[in-house]
């Protein structure tokens, strides 16, 4: 990667702030970006990379801002985009909301961050926790915490400071899996997968080494072993703290963790997922006078598990009125601005079935085909449960002072993009 300059623009293309790293691209070239972008929008051919002569604009949009990197080289575009998204992440860590006003109110901090994040077109320190050690913000003022560079910048373990102390040493591990399911109107699963992550909250003194072991069901896409009943993780991404060489040799996840909250790893499991909450629906319209809706929900997960805060969102015609509901459990309400009935069940045990009936008036004559057939969507969260069966087998904490630390593990399965299409 080699970016010549980075710009932050408002929606009209006005430069709010910029940093010229190499000086090999004329800074006035940015004036061509917005006209070219608008031309592409009008032609319906919007592209993440726009060229003007031998200058290339790589851009992303966030809120009411455009972040643009310029280059005249054949650079690695994916790395440039990774840097731009990292820029958004760091700015958000500092300003909470990244928008035009937060840039204008914090010019000094933004310039200082741009200087530290990149040097001569190459990314340098991009960890917000490290940056916050020596670039701190009070109101709109910049404070330099120390004249010397913190050890973390030059240390091999750049993501963790030395000298961290806690009265009580603990580490919290969250295994979170989101289930994506698309079911057609005939009740067949069209697509499904699991997107998971292992998140940490570490409150450990010193410079501990952690070793995480997962159960034997887990295989990684690089292994050549027979899959059998195992779960194969794909698209595995690790935090920079993980010793990849150790992982590649014996599949041990060994690392010195960042202090506080972090995402240790993320993964995807491409497998057939049985819908955890199954929905059957009947929607009947009567001569443009009324519509009757019957929805049956069944928990297709372990009986000892309970889904919390279940929301079943059922589409209704845009001209429906005079709602009446009857539910075997929970509460149903009409949300006219979204043309939906939202059926809320706070506690949904596995293996149970519940029923909701709704009655609406249809005063006007509408074209059913013009309205389309939106799917039913479901939101839920099931604690103490992973749909893939992945479990933390052990967490070893090794620190030279020999203190005892408590690891806590929590499992959560939640809905991702969870849709069930209807016939009506």
Image (cartoon, rainbow, N blue to C red):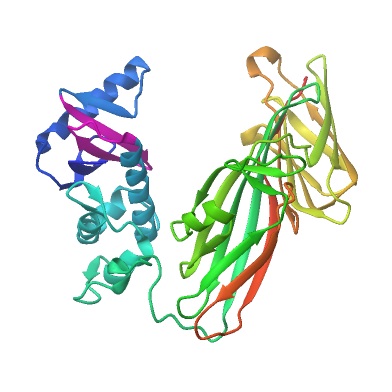
Q: Position of residue 199 (x, y in %)?
A: 57, 59
- Nearer to me, 268 or 218: 218
- Which image quadrant: the N terminus? top left
In the image, residue 329 above or below residue 384: above
In the image, residue 173 above or below residue 381: below
Q: Residue at x 25, y 35 (%)?
A: 75
Q: Is residue 107 left or right of residue 156?
A: left
Q: Is residue 266 left or right of residue 189?
A: left
Which region shows up in magenta?
A: 54-77
Q: Is residue 121 left or right of residue 241?
A: left
Q: Residue at x 55, y 85 (%)?
A: 402
Q: Residue at x 24, y 23 (%)?
A: 36
Q: Residue at x 65, y 46 (%)?
A: 219
Q: Position of residue 363 (x, y in %)?
A: 74, 21
- Which image quadrant: the C terminus? top right
Q: Is residue 201 left or right of residue 345?
A: left
Residue 138 visible in the current orientation: no
Is 96 colored magenta in this rendering? Answer: no
The chief SS type of the magenta part is strand
Is 60 colored magenta in this rendering? Answer: yes
Q: Position of residue 253 (x, y in %)?
A: 56, 59
- Nearer to me, 246 or 333: 246
């Amino acid at each position: 990667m080699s970016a010549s300059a980075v710009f932050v623009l408002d929606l009209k293309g006005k430069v709010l702030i910029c940093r010229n790293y190499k000086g090999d691209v004329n800074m006035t070239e940015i004036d061509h970006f917005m006209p070219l972008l608008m031309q592409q929008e009008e032609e319906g051919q919007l592209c993440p990379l726009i060229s003007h002569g031998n200058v290339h604009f790589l851009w992303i949009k966030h809120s009411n801002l455009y972040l643009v990197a310029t280059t005249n080289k054949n650079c690695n575009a994916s790395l440039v985009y990774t840097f731009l998204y990292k820029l958004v992440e760091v700015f958000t860590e500092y300003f909470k909301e990244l928008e035009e006003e937060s840039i204008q109110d914090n010019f000094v901090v933004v310039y200082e961050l741009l200087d530290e994040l990149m040097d001569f077109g190459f990314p340098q320190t991009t960890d917000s926790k490290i940056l916050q050690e020596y670039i701190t913000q009070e109101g709109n003022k910049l404070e330099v915490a120390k004249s010397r560079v913190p050890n973390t910048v030059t240390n091999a373990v750049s993501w963790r400071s030395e000298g961290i102390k806690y009265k009580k040493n603990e580490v919290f591990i969250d295994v979170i899996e989101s289930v994506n399911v698309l079911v057609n109107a005939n009740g067949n699963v069209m697509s499904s997968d699991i997107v998971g992550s292992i998140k940490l909250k570490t409150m450990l003194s010193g410079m501990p080494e952690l070793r995480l072991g997962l159960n034997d069901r887990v295989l990684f896409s690089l292994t050549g072993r027979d899959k059998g009943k195992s779960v194969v993780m794909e698209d595995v991404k690790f935090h920079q703290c993980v010793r990849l060489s150790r992982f590649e040799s014996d599949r041990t996840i060994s690392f010195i963790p960042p202090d506080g909250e972090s995402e240790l790893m993320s993964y995807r499991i491409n497998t057939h997922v049985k819908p955890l909450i199954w929905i059957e629906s009947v929607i009947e319209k009567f001569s443009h006078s009324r519509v009757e809706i019957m929805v049956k929900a069944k928990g297709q997960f372990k009986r000892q598990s309970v889904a919390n805060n279940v929301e079943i969102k059922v589409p209704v015609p845009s001209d429906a009125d005079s709602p009446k509901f009857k539910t075997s459990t929970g509460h149903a309400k009409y949300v006219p601005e979204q043309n939906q009935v939202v059926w809320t069940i706070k506690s949904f045990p596995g293996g149970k079935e519940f029923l909701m009936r709704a009655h609406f008036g249809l005063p006007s004559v509408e074209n059913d085909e013009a309205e389309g057939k939106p799917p039913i969507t479901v939101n839920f969260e099931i604690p103490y449960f992973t749909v893939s069966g992945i479990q933390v087998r052990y967490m070893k904490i090794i620190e030279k002072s020999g203190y005892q630390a408590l690891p806590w593990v929590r499992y959560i399965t939640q809905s991702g993009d969870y849709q069930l299409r209807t016939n009506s």
